């Protein structure tokens, strides 16, 4: 069977890590007997420079007809002063909205070989295995925006339907994991969060009575994520809270470069990308950690191509490469040798 994958390298280190993820996808395709048709398209700042838009119509149409979409990263200081609607990040936001990708899955798990890379004490990190489900197409990022000479406005809005569908995703995931969901809001202050808590309470009570459910305010969740991370199983929250909490959670495995994500809707295609940004300070130096991108490729196999065995093989290969001593500089301990982006992927491919 042949699967069509649109590859959006984007900006900064995006094309570098995307290229390594593609190498691993191609190796997995060869090993597990399926074919890939790769279609490279522009997004973000690179698209703005060439086509005058961060999301050209050709890119969007290609993505809509693909089996899955893989993204490197977008953005950078080069485009900081252009009109807001044309900034690179608007390309990614627009793509998520156009494809109806309302559920962003961000797995966070510690790996014993690099547990020393985390700023947290090792005893806090044993058994950490969290799936964060972030609502992706509502909230303050997509609300009405206004700007005057002396004020600015960003509105946060959620509907019952938007909250219901993302809670159902979280509930189904928890049923296949350890049976616990933590819903995160700011219901003591925000009206949208009060609606969130009411809807989440109903959905989990009526549709997932087998689950253990807890509700946490977002500031408490941020604290408990560092003080008792192993207690969490599935966490579900709104768009901005999920964005912030998963950046915090990246310190559990030791680096933002280790975390993957999958953005899913009601049907294909899904969008897969590492959670890190474009890191313009290291772009072109060949030192970026490709793990998040490669683990995102594994999620692509699991959720879009229905190839869980191939996905697990890639995840095991990343763990194996780390166990063999391969390190990019962001996860290398003081005095420990590190390798570049491509050499690290070579270690993963040897394990695969």
Image: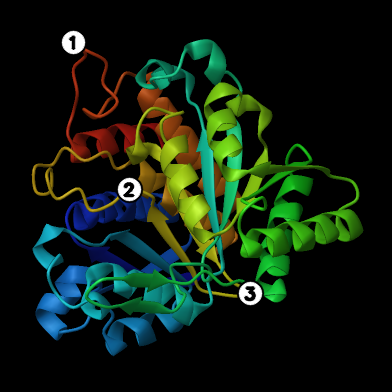
Within 10 Å of the Cα at label 2, are there few (<14), some (14-19), or many (20+) other Cα atoms?
many
Q: Seen in the image, is 115 located left or right of residue 286? A: right
Is the C-beta separation of discs 1 and 2 under 8 Å? no
Residue at 33% over, 39% down: 257
Q: Is residue 262 above or below residue 7?
A: above
Mark linked to residue 276: 2
Residue at 44% over, 79% down: 144
Foreground of the two, 249 or 298 = 249
**Image location (x, y in percent) of residue 256:** 35, 39
Foreground of the two, 303 or 253 = 253
**Earlier-in-chain disc, 1 versus 2:** 2
Mark linked to residue 335: 1
Asked if one can make out residue 128 in the rendered structure from this viewpoint, the answer is no
**Image location (x, y in percent) of residue 148:** 26, 78
Measure the C-alpha gap from mark 1 to mark 3.
48 Å
**Earlier-in-chain disc, 1 versus 3:** 3
**Image location (x, y in percent) of residue 37:** 36, 71
Measure the C-alpha gap from mark 1 to mark 2.
25 Å
Considering the numbered disc 3 on the image, is that residue within a helix, a strand or a loop?
Answer: loop
Considering the numbered disc 1 on the image, is that residue within a helix, a strand or a loop?
Answer: loop
Considering the numbered disc 2 on the image, is that residue within a helix, a strand or a loop?
Answer: loop
Q: Is residue 116 above or below residue 107?
A: above
**Image location (x, y in percent) of residue 70:** 37, 63
């Amino acid at each position: 069977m042949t699967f069509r994958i649109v590859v959006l390298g984007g900006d900064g280190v995006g094309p570098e890590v995307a290229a390594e993820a593609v190498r691993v996808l191609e190796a997995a395709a060869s090993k597990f007997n399926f074919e890939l048709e790769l279609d490279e398209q522009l997004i973000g700042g690179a698209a703005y420079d060439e086509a005058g838009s961060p999301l050209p119509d050709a890119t969007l149409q290609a993505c809509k007809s693909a089996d899955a979409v893989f993204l490197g990263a977008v953005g950078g200081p080069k485009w900081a002063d252009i009109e807001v609607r044309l900034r690179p990040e608007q390309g990614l936001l627009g793509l998520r909205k156009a494809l109806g990708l309302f559920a962003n899955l961000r797995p966070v798990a510690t790996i014993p070989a690099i547990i020393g890379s985390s700023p947290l004490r090792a005893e806090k990190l044993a058994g950490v295995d969290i799936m964060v489900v972030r609502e992706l197409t509502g909230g303050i990022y997509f609300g009405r925006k206004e700007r005057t000479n002396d004020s600015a406005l960003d509105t946060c809005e959620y509907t019952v339907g938007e909250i219901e569908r993302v809670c159902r995703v979280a509930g189904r995931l928890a049923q296949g994991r350890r049976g616990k969901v933590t819903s995160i809001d700011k219901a003591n202050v925000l009206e949208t969060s009060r609606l969130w808590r009411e809807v989440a309470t109903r959905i989990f009570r009526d549709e997932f009575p087998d689950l253990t459910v807890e509700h946490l305010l977002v500031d408490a969740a941020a604290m408990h994520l560092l003080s008792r991370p192993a207690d969490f199983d599935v966490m579900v929250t709104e768009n901005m809270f999920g964005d912030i909490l998963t950046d915090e959670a990246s310190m559990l495995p030791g680096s933002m470069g280790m975390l993957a994500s999958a953005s899913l809707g009601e049907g294909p295609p899904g969008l897969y990308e590492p959670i890190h940004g474009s890191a313009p300070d290291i772009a072109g130096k060949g030192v970026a950690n490709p793990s998040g991108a490669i683990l995102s490729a594994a999620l692509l196999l699991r959720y879009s191509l229905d190839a869980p065995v191939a996905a697990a093989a890639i995840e095991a290969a990343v763990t194996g490469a780390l166990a063999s001593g391969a390190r990019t500089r962001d996860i290398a301990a003081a005095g420990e040798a590190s390798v570049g982006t491509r050499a690290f992927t070579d270690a993963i491919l040897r394990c695969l």
